[in-house]
Image (cartoon, rainbow, N blue to C red):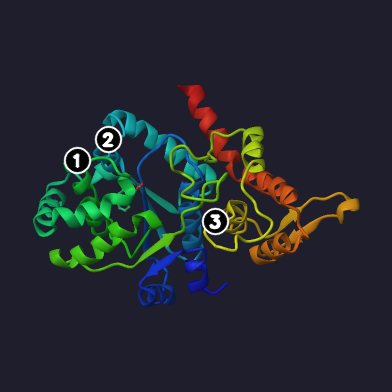
């Protein structure tokens, strides 16, 4: 695969395409990052951006994972000590998933965000940014609670991190786009360079095909799921055999194949008894999607296969999580 295609595959948006093309022309040693508010258990939402980091490593870039402990603290996710503990667990699960430790730089936000120079730059950004602008940037991340002062500081710090981690590309889910747009506007105010951003899609809720998978109340697949739980969740997923004519609903089963399974396996095999036509193998997502639409591939077989591959993907992270919990 061509480097630009590898860097941008499964991206919902790149800002700007021209800047990313420039990066793709000379990716060696360029730095990309994703930041995560630490959480004790990784779910598929985390793994979607992790897959992108693996693509970028393959393209020759250096990847930085920011364990955003101070951001989680600002977003009221617990005591600082609790957040540091969950960050450790998160890091261990990422490594188990395949972000190799010698190729990935894991950085805690608190390692540099409390330095004098950083804090003074932050205050300068607070002066140059309107409250309204910062609130809008944060709306999708914070999800509708009454904004606290911490919620407007948060996107300003995310903006500064792009400079302080010396990054060439900011990566995040589509819910991060407004923060990255703010960063593109505000970094030049401080005399810093504008950086391109790449956004991954938000996967639809598994049972309804609407909204986002990681939202509370919905069904989420995580490193905590046993093989049986995972199978049960995938089997109850919304999987219409044909595309919704209105186009409002996504097919979460197909999305999981596209964003999670095909990027990590060369070839997918659907095991079927001879009397149902025997095994099917696919090297590309499109051919599987076409077979589902044409009726060649039954939704039940698609789900069974999806569950098997997802189980393989989360197996080592699940094992790691169990080890960590046994130590506690
Ligand atoms: C992502 C998050 C926090 C801080 C960051 C700093 C730099 C780059 C990315 C960052 C977490 C993210 C979330 N806002 O919603 O999980």
Q: The C terminus lies in which quarter of the figure?
A: top left
Residue marked by disc 3:
249
Position of residue 196 measured from the top left corner of the image (x, y, whole percent): 33, 68
The response on whether ligand 1 sits within 8 Å of label 3 is no
Q: Position of residue 234 (x, y in %)?
A: 63, 43
Q: Tell me: residue 252, above or below residue 10.
A: above
Q: Earlier in the sequence, mark 2 or mark 1?
A: 2
- Separation of marks 2 and 1 at Cα, in angstroms: 10 Å
Q: Which mark is residue 201?
A: none
The answer to whether mark 2 and mark 1 are in CB contact below 8 A is yes
For the residues carrying marks 2 and 1, which lies nearer the camera in this image? 1
Instruction: Of the two numbered discs 2 and 3 on the same chain, state the one appearing first in sequence.
Output: 2
Identify the residue under disc 2: 76
Q: In front: 135, or 172?
A: 135
Please indicate whether residue 54 sits to the left or right of residue 226 in the image: left
Looking at the figure, which quarter contains the N terminus? bottom right
């Amino acid at each position: 695969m061509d480097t630009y295609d590898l860097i941008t595959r499964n991206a919902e948006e790149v800002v700007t395409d021209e800047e990313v093309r420039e990066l793709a022309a000379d990716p060696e040693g360029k730095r990309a990052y994703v930041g995560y508010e630490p959480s004790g258990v990784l779910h598929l939402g985390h793994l979607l951006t992790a897959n992108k980091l693996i693509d970028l490593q393959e393209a020759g870039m250096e990847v930085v994972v920011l364990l955003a402990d101070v951001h989680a603290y600002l977003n009221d996710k617990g005591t600082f000590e609790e957040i540091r503990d969950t960050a450790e667990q998160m890091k261990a699960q990422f490594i188990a998933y395949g972000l190799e430790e010698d190729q990935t730089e894991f950085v805690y936000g608190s390692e540099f965000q409390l330095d004098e120079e950083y804090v003074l730059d932050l205050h300068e950004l607070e002066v140059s940014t309107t409250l309204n602008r910062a609130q809008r940037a944060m709306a999708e991340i914070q999800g509708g609670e009454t904004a606290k002062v911490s919620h407007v500081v948060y996107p300003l710090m995310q903006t500064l991190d792009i400079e302080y981690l010396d990054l060439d590309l900011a990566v995040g889910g589509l819910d991060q786009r407004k923060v990255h747009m703010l960063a593109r506007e505000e970094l030049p105010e401080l005399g810093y360079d504008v950086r391109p951003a790449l956004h991954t899609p938000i996967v639809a809720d598994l049972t309804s095909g609407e909204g986002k998978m990681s939202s509370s109340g919905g069904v989420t697949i995580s490193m905590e799921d046993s093989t049986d739980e995972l199978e049960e969740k995938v089997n109850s997923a919304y999987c219409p055999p044909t595309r919704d004519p209105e186009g409002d609903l996504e097919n979460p089963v197909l999305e999981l194949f596209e964003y999670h399974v095909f990027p990590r396996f060369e070839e997918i095999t659907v095991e079927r008894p001879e009397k149902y036509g025997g095994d099917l193998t696919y090297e590309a997502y499109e051919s599987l999607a076409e077979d589902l639409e044409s009726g060649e591939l039954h939704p039940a077989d698609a789900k069974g296969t999806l569950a098997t591959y997802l189980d393989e993907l989360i197996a080592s992270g699940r094992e790691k999580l169990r080890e960590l919990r046994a130590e506690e």
